[in-house]
Amino acid sequence: MCMDVPNPSAVPTAANRTPLHIGAVGLAVRDLETMEAFYQSLLGLSIIDRTSSVSRLGAGGVAFLKLEHRPGLKPDDKRTAGLYHTAFLFPTRADHARWVMHMARSHIRITGASDHGVSEAVYLDDPEGNGVEVYNDRPPELWQRDGDLVVMPTKALDIQDLLRATKPHESYIDAPAGLRIGHIHLRVGNVEKAEEFYRGAVGLDLTRRRGGATFMSSGGYHHHVGANVWHSDGAGLRTDDSAGLTWFAMEAADDQSLAQVTARLKAAGTVLTEVPKGVEATDPWGTRVRFVAA
């Protein structure tokens, strides 16, 4: 009897098999064509739909990056609250290795490469200065835990070892169907206030604290949301006249998970606005966070 074997490059990862996970990210951009071309070239994302001012990109027919052109925007200021990086998660290590080979052949400039124990990550910036992480996860059973916390060191990435997961002749053109946003890392003005909202009101679990940063997740993942004050300590409310992050969405695995997070937000006194398939809240710095059905 022949059984169909799922393509590992199209199977949801540990980041997306949790009660809440990152669904999509919205960026306000100064130059739509340049930004659109960058994410197509960098990751092989497909345009899911487009208007003259908005482009929605993704993989496997799923849109998870919305670029919205707004005339007259100022460049993003790293000293303010906003986006530290959007982290794109490959479904397999081999997919990530093929992408690293593509990156090297394309002479794409990176800002860092780290082994975090739970993951292998490469860092860079898009043309408008938004941070980008591109990573793969090690199997969750190999993650080191310290009680309820997850051990996430920062060591130099062994790129040559990563490249052994692919073959030199293998090319990278289109993003694998299972590529998704695994987590988002925010610039905030105060770590404790970030935890009050994302842990206290949203209900995420603390997985790690280190040096002006906190990491939180749903369902045992290493982190869906990171928040740091490395360049933005003391930052106040954001304004809407700068390029960068406008909103991000957390998708609920089922109706019960969505109902639970909505009830928790209401109990915390959070002002909620209805959006398609869910509700929207704002964090203490004015970043809009949507909680929606998957």
Image (tube, rainbow, N blue to C red):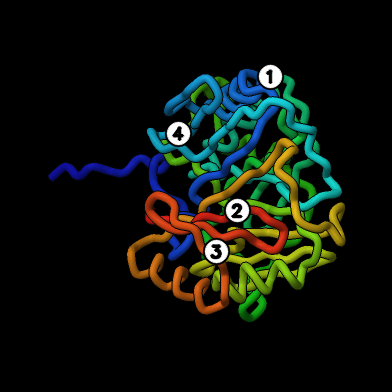
Mark 2 and mark 1: Cα distance apart in space = 35 Å
State the SS at label 1: loop
Q: Nearer the viewer, mark 4 or mark 3?
A: 4
Q: Nearer the viewer, mark 2 or mark 1?
A: 2
Mark 1 and mark 4: Cα distance apart in space = 21 Å
**Residue 288 image label:** 2
Counting residues from the N terminus, which is met first, the one under dot 4 or under dot 3? Answer: 4
User: Horizontal and vertical percent for residue 244?
Assistant: 70, 39
Mark 4 and mark 2: Cα distance apart in space = 24 Å
* Residue topped by disc 1: 106
Q: Amino acid at mark 1?
A: Ser
User: Horizontal and vertical percent for residue 284?
Assistant: 70, 63
Proximity of marks 2 and 1: CB atoms separated by less than 8 Å: no
Q: Amino acid at mark 4?
A: Ala
Q: Amino acid at mark 3?
A: Tyr
Proximity of marks 4 and 2: CB atoms separated by less than 8 Å: no
Mark 3 and mark 1: Cα distance apart in space = 32 Å
> Is 65 on the left or on the right of 256, as rendered?
right
Spot the residue most to the left.
1
Mark 4 and mark 3: Cα distance apart in space = 22 Å
Residue pictured at 16% horizontal, 42% vertical = 2
Counting residues from the N terminus, which is met first, the one under dot 2 or under dot 3? Answer: 3
> Is 266 on the left or on the right of 157, as rendered?
left
Above or below residue 233? Residue 83 is: above
State the SS at label 2: strand
**Residue 59 image label:** 4
Residue pictured at 64% horizontal, 35% vertical = 28
State the SS at label 4: strand
* Residue topped by disc 3: 221
Counting residues from the N terminus, which is met first, the one under dot 1 or under dot 4? Answer: 4
